[in-house]
Image (cartoon, helix red, strand yellow):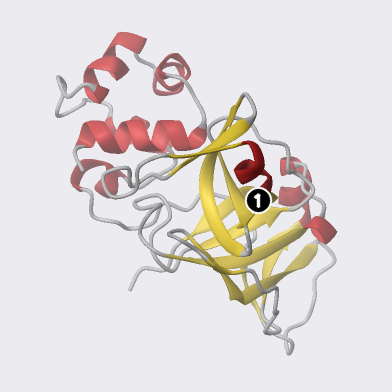
């Protein structure tokens, strides 16, 4: 994946336009267009660009993954023997659900007892109710490089309304999947970030009724091995 593709992938993942990204970086929209079409291969404001795209500068420049987790204050793994803080909330971590980013695995919300600790203030800022949120693992390479194999996603089950270009957890006829969704007249389009290996999937009519939105992905994180 080239620099142009990485910039476009991250921008689309954040749901912002070239003009909006340009405003964040402090350059013109034409400059973003030149980067995304491959004309500009070494942008002067690479640091500002990485900050606006919420990814590491190293990954943006080289494609080597450090971490592409969306920044959010106060997140850590929590175990039963830790003391609680009044400003902390503990979201259940459904390891066995393992939302598959490829063809999917059967949806099983079987919590192992592990939880992820979030700041209540951060959740409120995002409009997420703690009782409507949960964390799960993602497996497969269809959503790389944004959601690599083994990534963790936090899902807002209180937000199931499809907004074009956003990432959602799905129950697709009994299989758990994570995809970018687009509404279609009488149907839905499922898109992966890894479009080279996974082309768009279009479901219409009765086939689209087999797809149930579990919730919107509002945070994701990766572990660097």
- Identify which residue, 60 or 198, lies in the foreground: 198
Residue 145 vertical placement versus 204 (above, below): below
Query: Dot 1: few (<14), some (14–19), or many (≥20) neighbours within 10 Å?
Result: some
Q: Quadrant of residue 112?
A: bottom right
Q: Residue at point 43% right, 59% down?
A: 102
Dividing the image into 4 quarters, which one contains the C terminus?
bottom left
How far from the left and from the top, in percent, is residue 99?
Answer: 55, 64
SS for dot 1: helix
Q: Which residue is mark 1?
A: 210
Nearest the viewer among 169 and 36 is: 169
Q: Is residue 37 above or below residue 211?
A: above
- Residue 13 coordinates in the image, percent (x, y): 46, 37
Judge from the rendering whether residue 121 lies leftward or rightward of residue 96; answer left or right.
Answer: right
Q: Is residue 113 visible?
A: yes
Q: Residue at x 46, y 22 (%)?
A: 24
Establish if 41 lies above or below 28.
below
Task: Between residue 184 and residue 195, name the one nearer to us.
Answer: 184
């Amino acid at each position: 994946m080239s620099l142009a593709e990485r910039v476009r992938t991250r921008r689309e993942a954040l749901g912002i336009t070239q003009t909006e990204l340009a405003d964040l970086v402090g350059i013109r929209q034409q400059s973003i267009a030149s980067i995304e079409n491959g004309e500009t291969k070494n942008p002067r404001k690479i640091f500002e660009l990485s900050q606006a795209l919420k990814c590491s500068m190293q990954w943006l420049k080289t494609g080597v993954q450090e971490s592409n987790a969306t920044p959010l204050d106060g997140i850590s793994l929590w175990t039963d023997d830790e003391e609680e803080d009044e400003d902390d909330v503990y979201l259940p971590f459904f390891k066995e659900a393992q939302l598959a980013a490829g063809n999917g695995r059967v949806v099983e919300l079987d919590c192992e007892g592990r939880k992820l600790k979030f700041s209540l203030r951060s959740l409120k800022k995002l409009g997420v109710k703690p009782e409507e949120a949960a964390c799960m693992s993602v497996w497969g390479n269809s959503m790389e490089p944004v959601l690599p194999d083994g990534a963790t996603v936090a899902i807002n089950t209180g937000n199931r309304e499809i907004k074009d270009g956003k990432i959602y957890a799905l129950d697709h006829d009994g299989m758990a999947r994570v995809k970018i969704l687009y509404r279609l007249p009488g149907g839905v389009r499922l898109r992966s970030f890894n479009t080279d290996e996974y082309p768009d999937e279009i479901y219409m009519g009765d086939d689209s009724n087999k797809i149930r939105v579990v919730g919107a992905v509002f945070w994701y994180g990766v572990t660097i091995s």
